[in-house]
Amino acid sequence: MLFLVLIGGSFYFFKNTPFKRDLEFYLVFGRVNGLEIGSPIKYRGILIGKVVDIEIKGEEEIFVKVSINKKYRKLIRVGSEFNLTKESIFSSQRFISLDKIGDPENPTISNGEVIYMKKTIWDKLEDLTDIIKNDIHNKNRGKNEKK
């Protein structure tokens, strides 16, 4: 009986060690247009993970929970850089790309860590477009109310 408990315990321990499970952590973006649960995460065109959850936490904070396949988790280090990328110029679908692997001297990311993304030039352009659209809408509404 003790033998079975030892075998079962060691199987559970080795199955649940950190490098035997997929890596799950959060990327925080300002906007995630076209990103969905199940969207891929790629490194140089290779599928390394997927989006498992998307949650709005604040006006400018969208938490995207990602899962990286256990065989690629060693790529995700402090200093790694991610970006939202369109599938093609004709598609509104997006995926997350791992654009830069952190320095090999840096520690790997742990489960549950939160990484805040920097605003890209495209994010800033979309913000500007939203401001212009709202301004035009408000001006048109003002003209209609005067009539």
Image: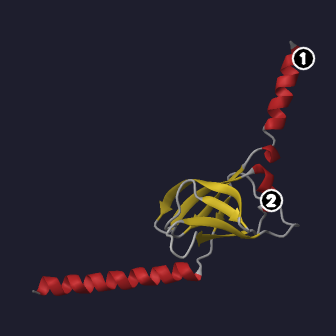
Q: Quadrant of the N terminus?
A: top right
Element assignment for label 1: helix
Residue flagged by tag 1: what amino acid is it?
Phe
Crowding around mark 1 (Cα neighbors within 10 Å: few <14, some 14 to 19, many 20+) is few
Q: Earlier in the sequence, mark 2 or mark 1?
A: 1
Instruction: Decide: is 67 above or below 88.
Output: above
The picture quadrant where one finds residue 29 is bottom right
Instruction: Decide: is 64 above or below 132.
Output: above
Q: Say which residue appears at 80% left-offset and 44% top-offset.
A: 20
Instruction: Read off the residue under disc 1.
Output: 3
Which of 94/133 is in front? Answer: 94
Residue flagged by tag 2: what amino acid is it?
Thr
Instruction: Decide: is 57 above or below 19.
Output: below
Q: Is residue 109 visible?
A: yes
What is the residue that sits farthest to the left in this orientation?
Answer: 147
Q: Say which residue appears at 25% left-offset and 87% top-offset.
A: 139
Instruction: Read off the residue under disc 2.
Output: 108
Measuring from the top left, give residue 78's x and y in whole percent: 77, 65
Q: Quadrant of the C terminus?
A: bottom left
Colour pattern of the rendering:
secondary structure
Q: Say which residue appears at 60% left-offset and 71% top-offset.
A: 85
Measuring from the top left, give residue 82's x and y in whole percent: 67, 69
